[in-house]
Amino acid sequence: MASIGDGSERQRIAQQRLRVLAGHLRRLGAEERPGVAAQECRAGPRTRRENVPAAPQDIMKWNGWGYADSKFFFNKKGQGEFTGKRYRLSGLILPSLKDWFEGTFGANLQHKSPAVPSLNTSAVAPPSLNEAFVEELKSTGIPFSHDTEDRVFRAHGHCLHEIFSLRDGRVGRCPDMVVWPNCHNDVVKIVELACKHSVCLIPYGGGTSVSSALECPPEETRSIVSLDTSQMNRILWIDEKNLTAHVEAGIIGQDLERLLNESGYCTGHEPDSMEFSSLGGWVATRASGMKKNIYGNIEDLVVHIKMVTPRGVIEKSCQGPRMSTGPDIHHFILGSEGTLGVVTEVTLKIRPIPEYQKYGSVVFPNFQQGVACLREVAKQRCAPASIRLMDNEQFQFGHALKPQVSSIFTSFLDGLKKFYITKFKGFDPHHLCVATLLFEGDREKVLQHEKLVYDIAAKFGGLAAGEDNGQRGYMLTFVIAYLRDLGMEYYVIGESFETSVPWDRWVLDLCRNVKERIVRECKEKGVQFPPLSTCRVTQTYDAGACVYFYFAFNYRGLSDPVHVYEQVEHAAREEILANGGSLSHHHGVGKLRKEWMQETISSVGLGMLKSVKDYLDPNNIFGNRNLL
Amino acid sequence: KDPVLKKRDDFEDILEERRNSSDLRYAFKCYTPVLYRGLTPCKAATLKSMVLQSEQLLHVINQVSAESGESTDVVKDEAAAILEEMAHRLQLRTIRFFAYTLSKAFKALYRSVCVNEEGIQRLQQAMQEHPVVLLPSHRSYMDFLMMSYILYTYDLSLPVIAAGMDFLGMKFVGEMLRMSGAFFIRRSFGGDQLYWAVFSEYVKTMLRKGYAPIEFFLEGTRSRTCKSLTPKLGLLNIVMEPFFKGEVFDVNLVPVSMSYERVLEESLYARELLGVPKPKESTSGLLKARKILSEDYGSMHVYFSPPVSVRSLAQGRINRSQFNLTPRHVAQKPSEETQAFVNDVAYRIVRLQQENMVVKPWVLVATLLLQSVEGMELTELMEQTSWLRDLARMFGAFLDWPGTRPLNSKVVLGGPVIRRLPVHIPIRQVEGPQGPETPEEALFNRAVSVLSCASYRNQVLHVFLRPALLAMALSNANSSRKEDIYSCFDFLRNVFSDEFILSPGASVQDFDEACHLLVKCGAVELLHQDVVMAESGRTVLSFLTLLLEPFLQGYQVVCRYLREEATENLTEKQFIPAVRSFAVKLHLSGSLKCYEVLSSDLQKNALNALIRLNVVRRDGLMSNQVAIVSSIHGMLIHSAFSLEN
């Protein structure tokens, strides 16, 4: 039923979209549409945007995560299914999803909480335009739009409260218009005009923020312009001698990777959001990639950055690999979250595509042992490209997403494995946990490396559990956001949040305390069913680890579920900070975690950042009010 | 807000079942306590090696070895020896043995041992959820035997108990206690870094692992006066630290109020306070003491208060991230904020203990008798007792009163305790039954009686304390203006805060509470900015003033001694005997009627108060000298006291 309804729904949206497009064409003239070759910016070959067009809402959900054609649903038989063709799970039946879903959340497939089918454009306040700005912008020829759907799509990231409101058909303050600069010079012009006419600019990359960073400050009285970098998506040059690539900052992760691959290279930077997030966004939030053990985080990858600020353009004069020239100005830009300017071009390190990739997994009798193993691996500095440790709840969750087995033989094998681990090895299925591994490099070295890691794991009681489990673990990170949309159809809301924390025992204690705090707070706030509160260690460092929490609960019976959710997340963050965790490892601060900034970096530190802001942007043109 | 409305649980007599069924079967019953859900099960021996291998201890060992030049192995051995001496060896066999013998003993000693079962249920719940710290009041050696006995009876996890090293002097018995869960700590180890490290790591390891509930006495030692003692913070600091550092989600503190109708050590205490040294703990002493088995110690009440979560207490008070910047194995000196917090918690717990102490009729009788040294007609006593009962009830006392009718003569006369209690002695002893005695002896004997009697009165002091301070302030303030009365109240409260449990910084709350109670009983009226005595308030106020009179007089005598007789080089050791003989002299000359000044407890408290108030100075730690500072402060105090006299 759901799929049929959905099909016609898509059709309807597409038709509506066409009408809107036609409107644009009339207004702007065909040559001004984004995506069409630009005027004077001809620095490099224009890349065709195959996956995300200029109007991303055409193929992406307007009120949920990711592609419109990919979603979980329960079919008539109550079996879970994932639609589309894009993922490994696509088109597969997931027989255990329902039981897990109902069992974990106390949810019921009879109790649905559907979203409003489409955006009611009349609910959105009309744009408040700065006419003088619009006039001058027109003369530059830079495409722009004040179409409602364009504005709404750029008014939010993917925090729970943002998506929840959209599903409810509620829209808060939106940008008043969207501009699509085509190159660095366009951005310079836009910023100049914004300063001249006192317009508020909010840079927009992939829109995957989970820190309320894209939310328009409701108190903003100026006209707000969303500066969408999606058209600045070219690789300007590749330097094979120095192994660097100079790229426009609007490029989306998967496009960057695909284009580099065509030349035999990669950046190796793979945040979980890489399908949708942009290079500029990574720089602006200090992003971290899954394979940072080999390639480094964004701050390690960046060689040169160009950023347009109200004060002018900031960049270094050379591409030396390291400099002793006072504090690194890159570090004012990295993590500035769009408060100082727009990152337009970035030079990144690139690597030849690895010859060989291999997934792997290890089962541990309990979380403690698993953490101890990860610690040892980090100590010996032999971490594979990626190593992650799921706790027991997440292990069970992963199992719920196992597709229907194709033959009796596989199911027999699965049974045998389970028997071996739980009965023969004596692992308690309610305590065991799994580490997923990804090795990369020369075939031979990978195999050596693999052996080394498995040997260490064995010392902590770990048993190798096969490539398939490993791969499923990584796949989970790409589909988990889709699962939240499924939950929201059935009164289940949730979110993930992360932190980084020193080794010793903090990792264990922090995980336990935060999980317990979540359970307690839910109970206190009147949540009727026990929440899902689970964590995993996703990155290891010499001195600590990155921990990711998933938290979700069934909100039936609550009058203001989002408020309850926010209170619990707030408490969880307090608990993280009290237990020695950081405010954020890679999601950033945005507006969601602003209140803790002073405590986190001291008031002097905050003053330092403020003075930089005051110098670069005295009139708060970049007025998204993140961070400070 | 109103303390009277406080709902308290009902009691069950646990001895009743013991009287009706086999003790042997009881001792061998199936014992399966519910366990802490985060428990990592381990044996007592594994526990020791865990402590010895802990980073915390190794860190200190390395430090000590670097400082002293000894090799780490030597220091390690030293640490192991300390731990060996300290550690308990809890085993069920010994518990069962105690379960049997104590059943016999308790049945002989007590008429009933009453426990609030709801408290037990709450405790059981708490024990599953979080590490639990049991904090009983400390009046008698019986306390911890009784605690373990009760927990065994209700099938709860047996606690490990911090006990003083003195018990180890008792051959055999010390080891028996060790096997029933006691671990032994030296009374003082101020500067010994290694000892402190072993000790704190031992306690913290047990707590973190959820090995067993940890039991210790906040008051540090048995109260010889039956008055709660100022809490000691060392162990409380230790058990809270794992929470501060995030090693456990929460720690539950459970105050336990143990009220005795008559304490086993009763007469020993009075003598000890008068300077007769405390008999050394020895096995033969214990055997000699078995004659007490033939005496009747009435009934006993044990009240388990609801668990207090350290996490909720710390909410908004402690910024736990302050512990993030040092590795956890490096011991940090607690910040001022933390110290103040721990101190507040300690006072709060002691007040909870007090609140749920059961007050028996004799306590009120003793209180009244102490106020009329000349004695009282029985009917008058009965009348006044029932008046006092109503007052106490109004002030929130937890009374155990036989029946609902007013105290009748049967209870007083037929009551098991009164006949033997020294309560009647102050009235009768004047004749001196043992023939001729020297004036000193007579004084001593009479002082024993008065101090014994006072130890009963002390059990109800916490109920009247705040109103009594206000009553005293009312009669001494310069005007009836609220500010004046408050400043007088605050002064008195400050002076007596070593004597009674008065939380630091809670002066305003205490004042409000006192006002509230006195208004409620009609003794005082609040008129705009004034606090005035009501017409009908005379009886209540004079009772309350008289209640604190002995303490006031005692402090005055101490002040007088320091002004008139003390020399420059008085050491703390000499101080007590010197004050005592000064007081004896005053007594014999007939110019002093108060006996409580002879109590070493009062003398020590007075000295501490004077030091705290900068009237007297301690010169150097080594010499323990007390120098007299004739500061303005000193004059102030003196004049204040003489004014009140």
Image (cartoon, rainbow, N blue to C red):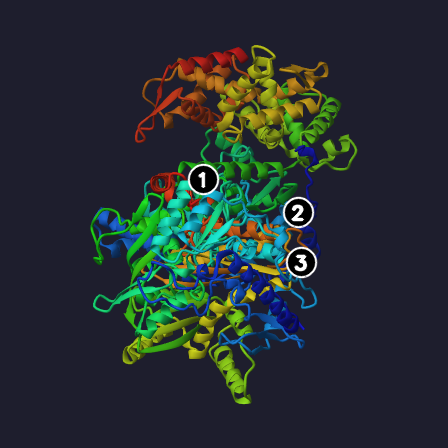
Tags 1 and 2 both on a single chain: yes
Q: Tell me the kind of residue under disc 1.
A: Leu
Circle 3: element type: loop
Tell me the subunit letter for badge 3: A
Separation of residues labelled 2 and 3 (CA atoms)? 39 Å
Residue under label 3: A556
Q: Position of residue B296 (x, y in %)?
A: 64, 41
Q: Reply above or below: A391 against B87.
A: below
Q: Which mark is nearer the camera, 3 or 1?
A: 3
- Looking at this view, is A48 or B580 the one in front? A48
Left of A453 or right of it: where is B528? right
Query: Which mark, residue A546?
Result: none
The residue shown at (42%, 25%) is B612
Furthest residue to the right? B405
Separation of residues labelled 1 and 2 (CA atoms)? 28 Å
- Looking at this view, is B432 or B589 the one in front? B589
Q: Position of residue B177 (x, y in %)?
A: 48, 52
Separation of residues labelled 3 and 1 (CA atoms)? 47 Å
Circle 1: element type: loop
Q: Position of residue B334 (x, y in %)?
A: 39, 41
Residue under label 1: B233
Query: Which mark, residue B116?
Result: 2
Q: Which mark is nearer the camera, 1 or 2?
A: 1
The residue shown at (61%, 19%) is B471
